Image: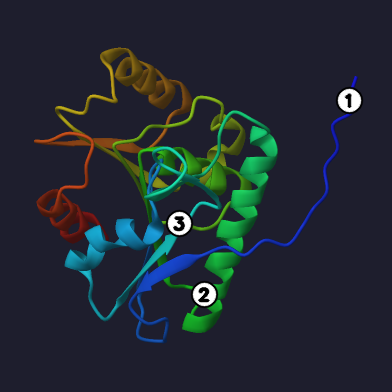
Amino acid sequence: MPSENFIKIDKTARYYLIGEPNNKIKSILFVLHGYGQLAKDFIQFFKIIQNEKLLIVAPEAMNKFYLKGFTGKVGSTWMTKEDRNNEVKDYVNMLNKIYQSVISKIGNQNVKLNILGFSQGSHTTVRWLNISKVKVSNIIMWSGSLPVDVNYLENYDYWSNVKIYIVLGNNDKFVSQEQFDEQKLIIKQNKLNLKLITFEGGHEIKSHTLQEIYKKFFV
């Protein structure tokens, strides 16, 4: 039987910014894209809330692939089921390094951090924070959900201080009633500080809803 082996290597990660990291920045919004997306496209949804005190950061998953066939449009994914533990470790390390780099350029360790994960990016967000314990004010899981394999109670002191918002379209074909019921059970069992927000639409970022949420909870 073949033996499985691992080796650590250097790899270049990419991320995009809206705004300039400087001492005028009061808050940072990390936006983590969904399956099959690229950061340069995903970050465009957030130009509508841009202002001089907000820095928007869009990291890009390191696993890229052609969306159809062997050429054409490219997308990326945070992880698959194959070698998932190392995939998670790698993207947590990447996100930590991007965060540390951005903070060092701003020069203010007390800047407010918010994170929005869309679809697959919501699971990435939660796993990143559960491992790294980065101080965060709010999490938005947009068209996404809480991963079931995270032990929230084990890190209750951390999660009890984080405000979590699940934002779902009422016609989101990727979220079934069974999944929704499972989420409610996770919330109850783990005593999470979570609020559900719904909007008219499907598996998408709605500009009007984004503006409302930003003004209501993050300004």
Judging by the rendered image, the residue that carries numbered circle 3 is 136
Residue 208 seen anywhere in this rendered image of the structure: yes
The amino acid pointed to by label 2 is Ile
The amino acid pointed to by label 1 is Pro
At a point 51% along the width and 65% down the height, the residue shown is 14
> Dot 1, crowdedness within 10 Å: few (<14), some or many (≥20)?
few
> Dot 3, crowdedness within 10 Å: few (<14), some or many (≥20)?
some
Quote the CA–CA distance across marks 2 and 1.
Answer: 44 Å
Q: Which of pointers 3 and 1 indicates the residue nearer the eye?
A: 1
Nearer to the camera, 74 or 20: 74
Judging by the rendered image, the residue that carries numbered circle 2 is 103
The amino acid pointed to by label 3 is Val
Q: Earlier in the sequence, mark 3 or mark 1?
A: 1
At a point 38% along the width and 17% down the height, the residue shown is 182
Q: Which of pointers 2 and 1 indicates the residue nearer the eye?
A: 1
**Is 94 left, or right, of 57 in this rendering?**
right
